[in-house]
């Protein structure tokens, strides 16, 4: 059994939407910084309050921003933004200025790169690779994107590799269009070819296909790197260096969600660390609703204990208010395991 | 509710965890009790509407939950494949296309296609078999992606059936008379902030507003534990209502498990709209 967060330089915080992942990730990061470590917390979608609490703004999309804390360790925060990371990747890895411009000015890239399904997850993988390989931090706490299936992120490296290894890229890389912008296959195939060309033109428009073909070709020098980094991140996520902190909502009706995450993580060979049951209602004597909530959450916790023997289960009571400064964030962090 | 009842297509959005599916079930049960034939559409591999209505899972089929109330769990890919099949009309070619890995990757990666197929599916059913189709959209960020998908596709693809469908659906989604939007939120910081961002994005990108805001799971006015929470929720409510003056319903947190009893209890509160 893997125990103790302090043994793992990378902590990935997972759980369904709305359970308080982001705040707990920040609290954990601050905690580790107070313990003397140089810590980075990477997050996707922090609330305004959390950004205010940490004192970071839009600039954290571009680079890691240091949060002033009184401790021996240092505390950094960074916000993940798909578009910014994508642009930066292109700038960093394109072989020369011409290739760089070719991608950045491509119409398909400009319109769609930020909106492609899964881009946020791919970019999180790239960003994680970047900071992990630089090795500037003792510990990285990674908050995962706010999807219901928050495990999409973990599958992103595999999807990148499978996409690059599939025939899709090879086909996209063929010189589909001649210099006049006509479909090559069409001129070779005679009447049938012209039929095909007009069919495609009718369905989606040749202009779009030309932009897409151009986009995939412009990206060609970058594919090998994408693949390599995706594999490296996949390995990192499965290694002993990484542990997963699963955040769960209280109450028996959230048990199915929690069990789903726990099972998926274990089956896929990741190291499941502590399971944090957040916002537990205390037992109450007075008030029908308060009694019901307290009882519901107590039973939920008992059931989880039975269903997940051998896991470290940490419960965090419902706080009177959400943390709004570093000291209240730190108090919350103290409730988390080391 | 009065205004909403006139729409044939209703999209329910909100941040994950605020009770979107519960509200979808509540709206469906309210409208079907008024005598309308209603279909609830869910897009989630892990179904939850069936639990709320006390029936067995849909597994992709349309199942009946109550008199005039039906549920379907949509498989986006199946809906999209169906749309492609209809447009190609050549079975042999279509089968080969649908089976090819290149098509699979294109569909996975191409923005907006799956979302557009879902809206088209809902629109068609709302035109004929059902008087109201209520779509339980993915959590806010993705809910916006769903609603803006047709205009994104129309922006990039100008001609042909796909571009044409994009333009047609973009009009449907942007027209409050054709498509009602319900925003579910909680009086807590993150959900409230996301709700405000959603309304701003909706205004910016589709020049429209939501028809109904449902504030779910409000703590009661009781001393002790709930006092601090109540203070927070009042502050968040003020901020929400400063930005939204349309129709809204406040629903209490009830001592009931997720299920038919909760849906029935909340349906009664829907009349308390302001």
Image (tube, coloured by chain):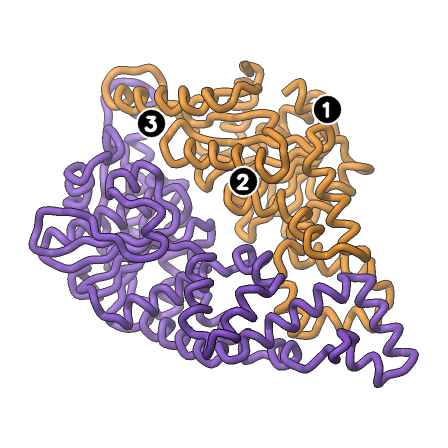
Chain colours: A purple, B orange
- Distance (Cα) linking label 2 and label 3: 20 Å
Specify whether residue A307 is in view: no
Q: Are discs 1 and 2 less than 8 Å apart at CB?
A: no
Q: Which residue sits at x=13%, y=47%?
A: A69
Judge from the rendering whether residue B233 lies leftward or rightward of residue B21; answer left or right: left
Q: Compute the Cα span from label 3 to label 1.
A: 38 Å
Q: Are marks 1 and 2 on the same chain?
A: yes
Q: Residue at x 75, y 41 (%)?
A: B123
Outermost left residue: A72
The secondary structure type at the circle numbered 1 is helix
Instruction: Locate residue A149, reporting x and y percent.
Output: 46, 54
Label 2 Cα neighbours within 10 Å, binned few <14 / some 14-19 / many ≥20 = some
Q: From the viewer's perspective, tell me whether residue A160 is left or right of residue B118.
A: left
Quadrant of the drawing holding the N terminus of chain A: bottom left
User: Which circle marks residue B6 in the picture?
Assistant: 1
Report helix, strand or loop for mark 2: helix
SS type, badge 3: helix
Q: Quadrant of the C terminus of chain A?
A: bottom left
Specify which label sits upstream in the sequence, 1 or 2: 1
Q: Residue placed at 56% from the left, 43% from the top?
A: B143
Q: Is B77 positioned to the left or the right of A124 in the image?
A: right
Percent coordinates x, y for residue A271 in the rendering: 29, 66
On whether disc 3 and disc 1 are found on a single subunit, the reply is no
Q: Which residue is mark 3?
A: A292
Depth check, front residue: B26 or B260:
B26
Position above or below: A2 against A322: below
Location of residue B147 in the rendering, given as x and y in whole percent from the top left corner: 62, 43
Give the labeled residue for mark 2. Answer: B51
Quarter residue B32 falls in? top right
């Amino acid at each position: 059994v893997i125990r103790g967060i302090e043994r793992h330089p990378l902590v990935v915080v997972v759980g369904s939407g709305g359970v308080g992942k982001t705040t707990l990730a920040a609290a954990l990061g601050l905690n580790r910084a107070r313990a003397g470590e140089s810590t980075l917390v990477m997050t996707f979608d922090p609330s305004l309050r959390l950004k205010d609490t940490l004192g970071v703004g839009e600039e954290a999309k571009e680079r890691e921003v240091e949060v002033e804390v009184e401790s021996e360790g240092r505390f950094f925060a960074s916000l993940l933004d798909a578009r910014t990371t994508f642009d930066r990747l292109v700038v960093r890895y394109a072989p020369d200025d011409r290739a760089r411009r070719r991608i950045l000015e491509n119409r398909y890239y400009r319109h769609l790169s930020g909106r492609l399904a899964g881009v946020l997850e791919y970019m999180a993988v790239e960003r994680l690779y970047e900071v992990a390989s630089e090795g500037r931090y003792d510990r990285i706490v990674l908050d995962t994107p706010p999807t219901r299936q928050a495990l999409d992120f973990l599958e992103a490296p595999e999807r990148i590799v499978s996409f690059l290894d599939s025939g899709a890229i090879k086909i996209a890389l063929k010189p589909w269009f001649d210099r006049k912008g006509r479909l090559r296959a069409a001129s070779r195939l005679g009447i049938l070819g012209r039929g095909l060309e007009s069919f495609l033109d009718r369905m989606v428009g040749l202009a779009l296909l030309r932009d897409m073909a151009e986009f995939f070709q412009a990206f060609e020098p970058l594919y090998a790197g994408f693949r390599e980094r995706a594999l490296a991140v996949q390995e990192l996520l499965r290694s002993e260096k990484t542990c997963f902190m699963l955040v769960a909502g209280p109450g028996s009706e959230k048990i199915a969600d929690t069990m789903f995450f726990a099972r998926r993580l274990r089956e896929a060979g990741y190291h499941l660390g502590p399971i944090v049951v957040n916002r537990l209602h205390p037992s109450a004597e007075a008030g029908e609703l308060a009694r019901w909530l307290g009882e519901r959450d107590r039973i939920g916790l008992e059931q989880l204990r039975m269903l997940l023997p051998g896991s470290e289960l940490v419960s965090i009571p419902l706080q009177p208010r959400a943390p709004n400064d570093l000291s209240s964030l730190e108090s919350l962090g103290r409730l988390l395991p080391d | 509710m009065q205004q909403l009842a006139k729409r044939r297509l209703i999209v329910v959005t909100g941040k994950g965890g605020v009770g979107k599916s519960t509200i979808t079930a509540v709206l469906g049960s309210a409208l079907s009790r008024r005598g309308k034939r209603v279909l609830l559409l869910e897009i989630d591999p892990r179904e939850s509407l069936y639990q709320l209505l006390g029936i067995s899972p849909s597994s992709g089929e349309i199942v009946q939950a109550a008199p005039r109330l039906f549920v379907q769990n949509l498989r986006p890919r199946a809906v999209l494949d169906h749309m492609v099949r209809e447009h190609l009309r050549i079975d042999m070619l279509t089968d080969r296309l649908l089976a090819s890995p290149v098509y699979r990757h294109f569909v996975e990666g191409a923005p907006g296609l799956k979302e557009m197929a879902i809206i088209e599916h809902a629109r068609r059913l709302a035109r004929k078999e059902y008087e109201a189709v209520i779509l339980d959209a993915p959590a806010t960020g993705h809910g916006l992606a769903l609603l803006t998908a047709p205009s994104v596709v129309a922006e990039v693809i100008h001609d042909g059936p796909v571009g044409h469908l994009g333009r047609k659906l973009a009009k449907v989604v942007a027209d409050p008379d054709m498509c009602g939007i319900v925003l579910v939120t909680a009086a807590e910081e993150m959900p409230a902030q996301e709700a405000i961002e959603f309304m701003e994005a909706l205004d910016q990108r589709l020049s429209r507003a939501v028809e109904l805001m449902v504030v779910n799971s409000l703590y009661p006015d009781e001393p002790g534990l709930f006092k601090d929470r109540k203070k927070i929720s009042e502050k968040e409510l003020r901020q929400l209502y400063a930005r939204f003056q349309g129709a809204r319903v406040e629903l209490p947190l009830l001592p009931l498990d997720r299920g038919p009893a909760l849906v029935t209890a909340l349906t009664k509160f829907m009349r308390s709209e302001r």
